[in-house]
Amino acid sequence: MRPTPATLIGSGKVESIAEEARALEPEVIIVNAQLSPVQQRNLEKAWATKVLDRTALILEIFGERARTHEGRLQVELAHLSYQRSRLVRSWTHLERQRGGFGFLGGPGESQIETDRRLIGERVTRIKKELEGVKRTRGLQRQQRKRVPYPVIALVGYTNAGKSTLFNTLTASQVLAKDLLFATLDPTMRGLKLPLGTRAVLSDTVGFIADLPTELIAAFRATLEEVLEADIIVHVRDTSHDESAAQKVDVLKVLSDLGVEADERPFIEVLNKIDLVEAEVRAGLVAGNQRPNGAVAVSALTGKGLSELLRRFEADLTRANIRYRLTLAHADGEGLAWVYRHAQVLERADRAKGVELTLAVDPQDVERFAQRFTAKNFVPAGG
């Protein structure tokens, strides 16, 4: 069906909805499409009520969900970008000129020009504030790299269960509800993996099909943890009828952000297996044993999470180098330091001390060599 320029939908359907609107008197009518300012104005006249298009609805939800200062700034920036593009529908006196000077507007400045100027000034201020947030986040990343702890970023379609998975793995209390965009602000927590590897787990905003370009730009700072992550974990709602289509949408948004699935470890998590048929669930869980396959889990019941944690550790330690280290029994501080900075594969308490077999990140080998003597810290093959 070809869109109608004036109203997007045909005149017959416009009148049919108008009749329903007169009977039901709704406060707002939502159109699941992107409307031009003229189309929105014409539909509001025809239906005698407020009309929101898809982008406006997403912005309304974002406005409800944002909690931190950064999140609210991101939402306001997206709102202003949207409003600036449709000031044409906000005023019926666009041709009226106003005089004055200073902040009241220059001679002959129209109301629409004044509003555009004020919005532009506010956008500039918000962008400066967000640059400060970006710098702070960059400093935090540098501090983590000095530790260093790798970052595991959860991504996925909105309402796929990322926050529930995040809470279960980290014993946190992040908002996790059956809501669109329940998480708007990035949340990070420490995570200890089965063999002692430590990492940082990051929860991110959910994606959605045809995300408006201004929202991708506005929320780019929020998604920077994904750009920097060592592992990207794509959480899918296996029980959703459109799970396959949602996967395509998520991969497209990641690509738009400059993240390609083959650039780094990329784990697909099939979540909510507790909501699928028993036979389907059994088939999905059987696939958990494949080294590089998808991992089937239920973030709610905990099924499959031990396999997922082992997969995290396997992917993070793949490039590690094996070393043997011998410590004195009394060197508790050194032993604690080793557990914080390496993966302990084996431990044996001997008469001469504690013998450890370690998997050490190549970037950390020099730190170990400086802290321990060459006699006690040797390659495992030597």
Image (cartoon, rainbow, N blue to C red):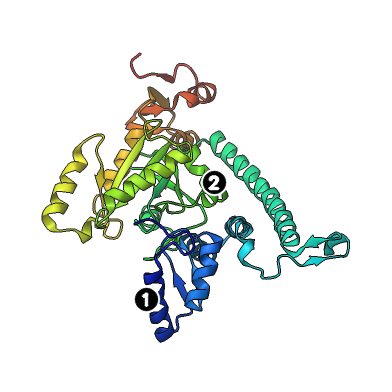
Residue 220 - label: 2
User: For this view, does 188 lie left or right of residue 120?
Assistant: left
Residue 150 in percent (x, y) is at 46, 37
Name the element at disc 2. Answer: loop
Q: Quadrant of the N terminus?
A: bottom left
Residue 108 in percent (x, y) is at 83, 61
From the image, state whether disc 1 or disc 2 is nearer to you.
Answer: 1
Farthest residue to the right: give it.
Answer: 101
Most foreground residue, 161 or 96: 96
Residue 256 in percent (x, y) is at 46, 40
Distance CA(mark 1)–CA(mark 2): 41 Å
> Splitting the image into 4 quarters, where does residue 327 fall?
top left
Most foreground residue, 247 or 40: 40
> Splitting the image into 4 quarters, where does residue 342 fall?
top left
State the residue at coordinates (31%, 43%): 268
Q: In which quarter of the image is the C terminus?
A: top left
User: For this view, does 139 lie left or right of residue 121?
Assistant: left
Name the residue that disc number 1 marks. 16
* Residue 101 visible in this rendered orientation of the protein: yes
- Label 1: how many Cα within 10 Å (few below 14, some 14–19, many 20+): few
Q: Do the residues labelled 1 and 2 touch (CB within 8 Å)?
A: no
Dot placed on the residue nearer the N-terminal end, 1 or 2: 1
* Residue 66 visible in this rendered orientation of the protein: no
The residue type indicated by label 1 comes to Ser
Farthest residue to the front: give it.
Answer: 11
Most foreground residue, 342 or 272: 272
Name the element at disc 1. Answer: helix
